[in-house]
Amino acid sequence: MIPQEKLDHLMARFSAIEANMSGGKKLSSEEFVRLSKEHAELKPVIDSILAWRAAAKELADLEEIMDDRSADPEMRALAEDEIYDVRKRVQDFENRVRIELLPKDAADEKNAILEIRAGTGGDEAALFAGVLLRMYQRYAELHRFTFEIISASETDLGGYKEAIVSISGPGAYAKLKYESGVHRVQRVPTTEAGGRIHTSAATVAVLPEAEDVDVDIQEKDLRIDVFRSSGPGGQSVNTTDSAVRITHIPTGIVVQQQDEKSQHKNRAKAMKVLRARLYERERERADEERANARRGQVGSGDRSERIRTYNYPQGRVTDHRIGLTLHKLDQVVIGEALDEIIDALTAEDQAERLAAMEGVAG
């Protein structure tokens, strides 16, 4: 049972914030921004608490009518008809409040850095990496996120050995964080004359985009090399040394960027990716210190974990973490049905965290 004192405290805090923001006292711009952020974070849980309490009051009134033997028989019959639906609403709102009270991932509201790499399967794996890249691009468009390619290494057949993109918008990382892992495809390649089904794979990594305040990168810890960009087959793309390779000496992380003609732009893009990788490394270290909490959750983010299979002959997509199969492959790979998988993964993660939290409370 959720302690009512905790809910009362949240309600009181929300009222105090609204009073301050509506002119209760003069606020500095920094205070106003901080309170606005807290107000936005609290509003969903406050709305759920109010809806839950209103439904609970309605249920109590119906139960009172049913327990009153002197009540009008028609009124009691109406109460009996309604009570099942109202009980269900009370339960649904209570569950919603529980979910709203779960600890939030500090990175959920951040932008995402998405890295896709062709795995086993040669040209077919690179073509599949291209399918995934376009799937996430369309998904970003549907959610009004900004999709920007940071770097990409294309193959002669139109596939991708590697692509790194930035997906920007409120909650982009929360939406995409369960996509990390190995994506496997089963289909007949266009180059296969015998019609045999081939299996190949691509690896996806989703990192929260870090801001300067999230990661402290010292200039002395960086080795920056500049060189001439080269295209497929080693041909020169630029006549100037505009490509940038940044090595973070303490961790050995290397980021290379050559897509832009400007050295300054290549460096800025490389630093964005480096910052995200260092931030994720620190988050993983912190998660490890919290023992097995993350390992027990859906979508641990392990990039070696096979998470999903796209079976073209059968037109199905299976997410192995939750055993979900959708016979909507065409809709998934154009981003339109991807939310059905992501929403199911989110719900499963919430259920597991609720069970863990209640187990500790018990």
Image (cartoon, rainbow, N blue to C red):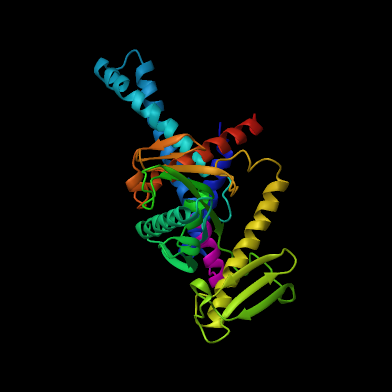
Q: Position of residue 299 (x, y in %)?
A: 55, 44
Image height check: is 193 above or below 141?
A: above
The residue at 52%/38% (across/down) is 321
Principal SS element in the magenta part?
helix
Q: Residue 350 magenta-drawn? A: no
Residue sticking out furthest to the bottom: 239
Q: Position of residue 353 (x, y in %)?
A: 57, 38
Image height check: is 76 above or below 265?
A: above
If the image is split into quadrants, where does the C terminus sit?
A: top right
The residue at 72%/63% (across/down) is 251
Residues shaded magenta: 26-40
The residue at 27%/22% (across/down) is 78
Residue 6 picture quarter: top right
In the image: residue 336, left or right of residue 279: left
If the image is split into quadrants, where does the N terminus sit?
A: top right
Would residue 15 be visible to someone looking at this image?
no
Q: Position of residue 69 (x, y in %)?
A: 34, 12
The one nearer the camera, 184 or 54, is 184
Q: How many marks?
A: 0
Q: Residue 38 magenta-drawn? A: yes
